[in-house]
Image (spheres, rainbow, N blue to C red):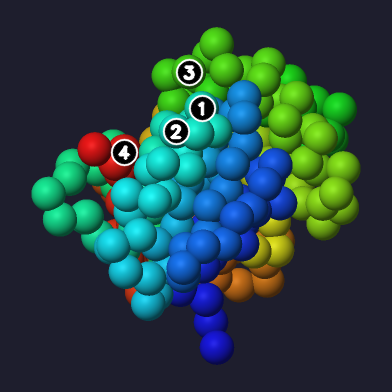
Amino acid sequence: MPPSALESLLAYYEPLSTLRRDFRGTATLHTPGSPLLGANASYLLDGASLDVLPLLKVWHLAHDAPPLLASLGEVPGQSPEQTLRVGLCIPVPDPGIIVVEQTSRLHMARFAAVLTEAYGLPEWAAPLGTGLAASLERLPDAALLLAYVGGEAIGALLWQPTGAHLWGSLDPAADAPLLNAAAELSGGPVWTSLPDSSPLTVQDEVEVCFTLLD
């Protein structure tokens, strides 16, 4: 049975996290010093009750972590910090102007710099690079992809057999080539996350909201 959108995100981010805690149908990932929302959230999995939210909030605050929840759709009475469209990305025609290459893990600093700049968080480049480098020591099948135009890196994506959820670009023109390359590594459609601003589409699209619990 294929995973759900939340299960896909959880499977992708768990190996990038420091700790996983399962509690009453939820799964919490905790990764101190990392800016990755997916690695620092409690996942409200299928069957979990909203009654558990106050207890999740207490746990996060006790660990000096923002009480971040990942859920299918919005939590009643709360406004999401970020909304993603999660689903299967099908390769699309690409004119080939932007080149995507798999890069060595020795180039993690460049990869992290491009990724954090894409999200407007350049100050997080060094901590993210350090954290990802440590995680990738346990992930021999993972691949770092960089998109180039004219020799300049304008996009970055971390592929794993579980999907391609962590990616970003400095130019929307790099989005499709990056995801096409990820799909090629997957041998077909690949699980991914699209921000609301992306013009791309995914198959079996589901809205996943990241919400700071009040």
In percent of the image, x 43 and y 19: which residue is there?
Answer: 120
Q: Quadrant of the C terminus?
A: top left
Above or below 202: residue 20: above
The local crowd at label 2, few if under 14, some if 14 to 19, many if 20 or more residues have their Cα within 10 Å, is few
Mark 4 in CB contact with mark 2 (< 8 angstroms): no
Is disc 4 placed on a helix, strand or loop? strand
Q: Earlier in the sequence, mark 4 or mark 2?
A: 2
Q: Which amino acid type is marked by label 2?
A: Leu
Q: Earlier in the sequence, mark 1 or mark 3?
A: 1
Q: Which residue is mark 1?
A: 64
Work out which residue is located at the far bottom of the displayed protein and give it. Answer: 1
Q: Which residue is mark 3?
A: 121
Alpha carbon separation for disc pair 4 and 1: 14 Å
Q: Which residue is mark 4?
A: 212
Work out which residue is located at the far top of the displayed protein and give it. Answer: 123
Specify the label residue 101 is tagged with. none
Q: Which amino acid type is marked by label 1?
A: Asp
Q: Which amino acid type is marked by label 3?
A: Leu
Q: Nearer the viewer, mark 4 or mark 2?
A: 2
In percent of the image, x 51 and y 62: which residue is there?
Answer: 23
Q: Earlier in the sequence, mark 4 or mark 3?
A: 3
- Left or right? Give the position of 28 relative to 130: left
